[in-house]
Image (cartoon, helix red, strand yellow):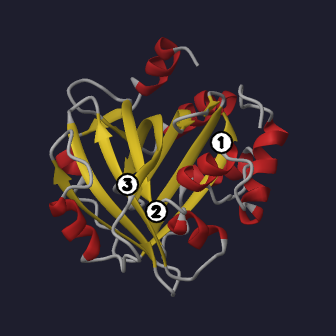
Amino acid sequence: MDASFLNEVLNTFNPVSLRQLNHLKLMNRMDSKFVLPLEYLHPMLEKASASYMVLEIENLRTFLYKTEYVDYPGLGLYLDHQNQRRTRFKIRYRTYPNSDFTFLEIKQKTNKGKTVKNRIEVPLDSRLTESDYSYIESMVPLKEKNLRIQTVNYFNRITLVSFETNERITIDYNLEMGGEHKKTLLPNIVIAEVKRELSNGNSPFLKTLKEFKIHESGFSKYCIGMALNNPALKQNSFKPQILHLKKLNYANTPF
């Protein structure tokens, strides 16, 4: 999508600052992910502009993200997700190139199905230091202390917020999922995630998704990226998502 075309519709939104966004508290949160074709993004944003504000930082309304996922040499964390282990973790470094901040983040899926995320800021070029390991080991029962970066993903993100319906929406596009030897580009799909209170049954964005016949679909950037770039990996659990991508036929790298 042409950047000027996207900026045109984003400029119709009222802005919200990061400080204001941080005041949005989702105490009993429900997260729902959706995969949709890029061509739907502009009309959906047009409909959303009446109900949501857009995050703006230093006059920017779209932001580049870089995510480095960490795993064991044998990909034990990936396999925990593939095997649908009830308690599982993702470990990643997330960098915001627009602001030069890097965070070490740990996401845990508990045995009750709840997602818990914790993070600390780390030096921009610091990876898997002793201090990082100490933080990781405080939350993750490591089997071995030889983690390494397995894949690096890039994407652009738009963040919408509504204080009226108490929800936050992230919209990711221009996905690039890569490893050392192979990359998969997904330039024509969008990953939207709606984060809202469980009690909120009045989400305008969810209603718009329903109008466009877009249904909820789990999508892990780490797991899908690893599966696409490493066909020999066990990946039965991710076949529905991969088949959906093939059906859309929007990856410009064969998989």
Disc 3 secondary structure class: strand
- Kind of residue sitting beneath label 2: Tyr
Q: Residue furthest right?
A: 247
* Residue at the (59%, 80%) spot, across then down: 85
Lower sequence index among marks 3 and 2: 2
Amino acid identity at mark 3: Arg
Q: Nearer the viewer, mark 3 or mark 2?
A: 2
| Vertical arrangement, residue 161 with respect to residue 109, above or below | above
Front residue of 64/6: it is: 64
At a point 71% along the width and 31% down the height, the residue shown is 251
User: Badge 3 is on which residue?
Assistant: 92
Q: Which residue is mark 2?
A: 72
Question: Dots 3 and 1: beta carbons under 8 Å?
Answer: no
Counting residues from the N terminus, which is met first, the one under dot 3 or under dot 1? 3
Report which quarter residue 239 is drawn in.
bottom right
Disc on res. 229: 1
- Secondary structure of the residue carrying numbered label 2: loop
User: Could you classify mark 2 by the number of other residues whose Cα lies within 10 Å: few (under 14), some (14-19), or many (20 or more)?
Assistant: some
Cα separation between marks 3 and 2: 12 Å
Image location of residue 75, percent across then percent down: 54, 62
